[in-house]
Image (spheres, rainbow, N blue to C red):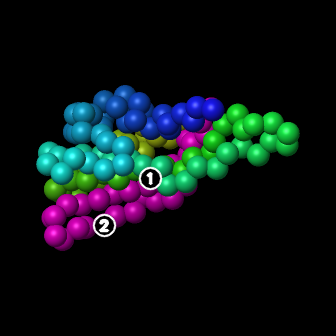
Amino acid sequence: MTVQLPRVQNALEGSTALTTIVADRISMGIAPEDQTRPYVVWWIVSAVPENLLGERPLEDDQRVQVDCWAMSQPQCRQMMQAANDACEAIGHVVLGPSYEYEAESKLHRWSFDLEVRNTR
């Protein structure tokens, strides 16, 4: 069985509105420690296999969180909107967007959760 990663990376990288701001700084899981700002991080929150009686699952229902990080709140909000638009093409936003300011790093974060189905 091969479980495919969500198509989120390709969707985000394919968004000109987003890559104009972050270039190639889109990471799964965690950003590198010395990451230039702004950047985007996404990760799989949960994955539930399709429930078929007597057969192996054909796909997984995955929930993915997308976090946009920037030094200014307006730029971060712009990134989140571009990421949201890109991700809505492959799934459904089911939570958010939500906003947080991280005082220690002085970074703004806009986040949302996306539900996608991935073929195995």
Query: Going by the image, does 25 lie left or right of 105?
Result: right
Q: Is residue 67 left or right of residue 118?
A: left
Q: Does residue 108 show up magenta in the picture?
A: yes
Q: Is residue 78 visible?
A: no
Distance from the alpha carbon under mark 2 to that under mark 1? 14 Å
Q: Is residue 8 left or right of residue 2?
A: left
Residue at figure coordinates x 24%, y 61% from the top left = 108
- Magenta residues: mostly which secondary structure? strand
> Crowding at label 1, few (<14), some or many (≥20) Cα neighbours within 10 Å?
many
Residue 113: within the magenta?
yes
Residue stretch in magenta = 91-120
Residue at (25%, 67%) from the top-left corner? 101
| Amino acid found under the numbered disc labelled 2 | Glu
Residue under pointer 2:
100
Q: Is residue 61 among the parts visible in the rendering?
A: yes
Which amino acid, mark 1? Gln
- The residue nearer to you, when weighing 99 against 33, is 33
Mark in the foreground, 2 or 1: 1
Which part of the image, by quadrant, shows the N terminus?
top right
Tell me residue 49's x, y (percent).
67, 45
Which residue is under mark 1? 65
Q: Toward which corner of the image does residue 36 lie, by quadrant?
A: top left
Report how many numbered discs are placed on residues in the image.
Answer: 2
Question: Residue 56's spot in the image, x, y percent?
Answer: 75, 37
